[in-house]
Amino acid sequence: MPGSASTTHRPEGLIERLRSAAADGGEAKLKVLRELKNQIIGNRTKKLSYIKLGAVPSVVSILSSASSSVDCLLIQCAATIGSFACGVDAGVKAVLDAGAFPHLINLLSHSNEKVVDAGARALKMIYQSKAAPKYDFFQHKNIEFLISLLDKNNENVTGLGASIITHSCETNNEQKILADAGVLKKLINLLQGTTSQRDASLESFATIIKQNPEVITKFVGPENSTTFGSLLELTKDRYPRTRLLACICLTLIKNATSSSSSSSSSSSYLQSVGIRTKLILVLLELVDDFGQVGDEALFTLSSFIEHEEDLQKLAFEANTVDKLCHQMQKESLQAKRLEGIFTTLGNLCSNLEPCRSIVLQSPKALIIITDALTHTTTDVRVAACICLKNVSRSVKYLSAGHFMTEAVIMPVIQLLYDASTSVQVAALCTVSNLVVDFRTHKSLFIQSGGVKQLVELSKSMDSTVRLNAVWALRNLMFLVDSRCKEEIFMDLKLFPLTRLISDSNACVQEQALGLVCNLVNGPVDSIMYLFTEGLLLNTVGRELRRASKPQVLVQAMYVMCNVASGKEFEKEAVMQQLVNEDDNNQSIIVTLLQSDVASLRTAVVWTVVNLSIPTGAGALTRVVKLRNAGVVSQLKNMVNDPCLDVKLRVRTALGQSMTFGDFST
Amino acid sequence: MPVRMVESPAPSNSSGANYGQTCLQPCSLLSVGQAFSGTQNVSSPQKDEAWRVNVRIQGCDLDHGYLCGTMEALNVPMADTPVVTFWEGEIVDTKNYTFFTNKWKATSEVDIEHWTKFPSFSPLLSQVEVDGGKSLDLSNYQYIFMRWKEQYFVNVGADCGLTIAGFYYVCFSCVDGSINGYYYDPNSSPFQKLELKTTNEGRSGFSFSSYELQ
């Protein structure tokens, strides 16, 4: 027959005894603390339950009132507090709210090593939580205290020092203060210690050097070459986490030194193909771990190869693409793993066509990537989108119409409506590539409502969204057939286009002018779009006189060039924009012909070539006007232009103008 | 005021550390979107025959010596519609590619035999015989040499009875955008000549379009 449970075995009973022990003292304290600790250790539910019942303040009260001579009581208090803080943010908060922090710090200077150890362990638990207070490195005494911790011959105390750094060091200034105080050397010394010391030390080391070339180049000089040896040795450690952390440190050193102009022995050291390949292989092996280590290994590998085609080649040769394509087909992958796979694949496909080919020839890879575009996690949607963007950098597959299918296009268009701006931007970048499609399939994108949303996003207040929306429209307009061109133009309307050409952001202007350039390219009738309301050419002309960014001027000049390849009245319209006889200032053509930017000079000379083509009723008049404006003289100065393209076009333009006679006499 | 024009010199032998490492300068007539039309002579001893051909440049990456596009053959006897193929080009820039093909069943003798058909190649011959042209600086030369290899049929199946097993030796003139080429396939009639000129699609002048991949 079941009996009623004694209240002393229920949490409420234990709390009652804890409170009375805290008030009365005696040996009961030790007993009840042990009991409480044994109940909560490794049990999150019980921790939360006791926190709710107010156990933590009682424990802290016992700690604060305990005599420093009762070592075992201090140890039990610290251990219980540490257990509450371990892995539970609410526990950390309760411990801090109860005022445990200064009492635990006091324990670190106790004469009994076991008490010190318990205090350090509890504090380490606190610093492993995001809820822990930020340590102020700007106080000199705090740095001194931190160094004293790292100097101790106690694993938990040095671990506490490392945890404080990993938790609190965030800014470049903080990194510099720690580096200047010699903390990096102390951490390197700890690499010889136990596994937990090594890992804690590597993590802190990574925190201090992260994206800080100044700290790295100062530290990783020739005098510290042994550090590399130690880090490289640790990439072969028997523990996966240690191998990972060593790879993270080496990746951070490589990335920071390759992005800074200063060279150091470290960067040259990491140039070795052998070492680079080894690092890639170590990380690839770690990727097989389906836990946190594997996830972090993927992001580390991705960061290691990002922006460096040579490294991407090495990773490709190590069969990374095959491995990831295989791994992404596994069932029920966690969001973090998917994000890591897409990010790494995306980097590999950013430059290398063979990588793209493997992804596109893998039976399910493209389906899995497009499925992930609708994933519930934002970061996965962004990573999948960027992966698709880089895979679609293949002109070969674009030309085969590989991407312009409903299965790919529809989910990407849907992402243009995503609530997250980062997803929208990633989707716009991807659309920019997909719509380059050279076959006659652009209509699928248009009929699916893509253009309307691009136009809508091109009006965004966010300049990144605006830029990428216009970029996508510009690429969509490239070699598009007349029917689609008309549909796009109808959606686009004139006013937004005029506004985009005059946008406050020069990059938006450049893309908008590129869009207009494509609009008036193709069948000669296309030029008429520019004259439907008579404003657009004026706007382009105004930007030619006003803009300073060469890329904007190049695009604007190619608009003029394309219009000048049209009929007589269209050539005349360009002349009106570029050569004003009533204006005593130097002609804009001459000014731009004198530019240092070869591509701009090329665009201008092409425009002059089109304006001076000898056939046509107004050709002579135009050539005379160009001569009067000083254009022909300027061209004569350019017959030996250092740019071959410019030089050849100058000869054509001069040859054409001279068919009407040499005006030099 | 008349100015004497300096004629483009023959390509120089570069020396020192920079040799063979200079990218070609961009040529606007060989940029994406540009179209060319002309013929390919496919005559055999039995019959004189030429197909009308249109070419469009779709991709250009000078850093990697890469060019690609489509080629449309218009009056192919055994096909009901124009046959479009996608081709990829290797630009002989002496950095990414030399005059020696080293693949596609082309020996260096075959290479020289085809390249010498282009008059603009003659100043380069002696050096190419030595090292495939590796030490030549072609960055200021008015001609661009390439190999175009068709990769797949765009609008017909691979079983259409036509072959794309061979490749073209191509010479592009930066001066006027004209293209000359010779098809090489050990199993096809030798030296089928490709002749293309830049087209202006009904315009009175040159027009340009562009895209940028992200």
Image: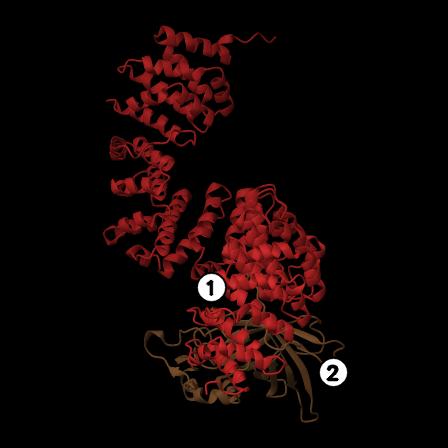
Q: Are marks 2 and 1 in contact (CB under 8 Å)?
A: no
Q: Residues within 10 Å of mark 1 (few under 14, many from 20)?
A: some
User: B205 and A211: which one is in front?
Assistant: B205
User: A56 and B24: which one is in front?
Assistant: B24
Distance (Cα) linking label 2 and label 1 = 50 Å
Q: Which chain is red in the picture?
A: A
Of the 4 image quadrants, the one containing the N terminus of chain A is top right
Q: Amino acid at mark 1?
A: Pro
Q: Position of residue A541 (x, y in %)?
A: 55, 64
**Disc 1: which chain?**
A
Q: Amino acid at mark 2?
A: Pro
Q: Residue furthest bottom?
A: B45
Q: Position of residue A427 (x, y in %)?
A: 59, 51
Q: Which chain is brown in the picture?
A: B
- B20 vs A137, left or right, is right
Regarding mark 2 in the picture, which secondary structure is present there?
A: loop
Q: Which residue is mark 1?
A: A550
Q: Which residue is mark 2?
A: B77
Q: Position of residue A302 (x, y in %)?
A: 47, 52
- B190 vs A169, left or right, is right
Q: Residue furthest top?
A: A24
